[in-house]
Image (tube, grey):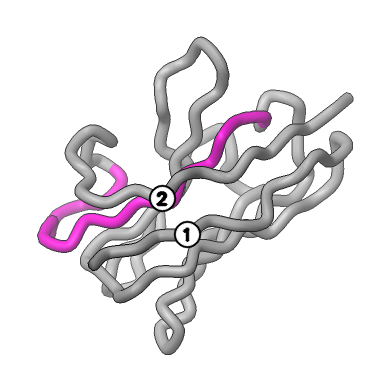
Amino acid sequence: QVQLVESGGRPVQAGGYLRLSCAASASWSCMGWFRQAPGKEREGVATIHFDGTTDYADSVKGRFTISQDSIKYTLHLQMNSLKPADTALYYCAADPAWSGDCYSRPWRAWHYWGQGTQVTVSS
C-alpha cells in the first residue's frame, strides 16, 4: 500500500524557514511538492526525478530546495525566506510510471497524494 505522510508544517513569520518532510513507502519516477492556498488551484512547487533532476516554480526558485533521502525514501522541502504568499496546504505527491519531465506533468495526473501539511506565514 502506497503511503505518503507529510510533516513539518507550522505557523512561521515572514523571513523564516521551515523544512517539510514526506515519509514515503518507496521511491518512484517522479516525486514532488504541491501547494494549495484557499480559493486557489493546486500548483506545483518543486519536483524531483528518479535521476535527480529537480525543477521549481518561479516563485520559489532560490528559496526552496527539494531533496530525497534515497535510503529512507523520505522527501524533503527546505523553505527559506518565507513570504506570506507561501501560505498554503502543502502536499507530497508521487507518480510511479511517468518517465518524462516531472514538473510539466499536470497535478491531476499524479497518482499518489499525502494528506497535506499546513504552512502559515505571517507578516
Residue 41 drawn above or below residue 111: above
User: In the picture, residue 42 is in which quadrant?
Assistant: top left
User: In the picture, residue 41 is in which quadrant?
Assistant: top left
Mark nearer the N terminus (1 vs 2): 1
Q: Which residues are magenta?
A: 87-103
Marks 1 and 2, how far apart in space? 5 Å
Instruction: State the mark number for residue 114.
Output: 2
Identity, as a three-letter code, of the amino acid under mark 2: Gly
Q: Quadrant of the N terminus?
A: bottom left
Identity, as a three-letter code, of the amino acid under mark 1: Val
Outermost residue, top side = 39
* Residue, disc 1: 5
Residue 28 drawn above or below residue 56: below
Crowd rating for badge 1 (residues with CA inside 10 Å; few <14, some 14–19, many 20+): some
Q: Position of residue 65 (x, y in %)?
A: 58, 58
Outermost residue, bottom side = 71
Residue beneath the point at 22% across and 56% down: 95
> In terms of depth relative to the viewer, which is nearer, 59 or 16?
16
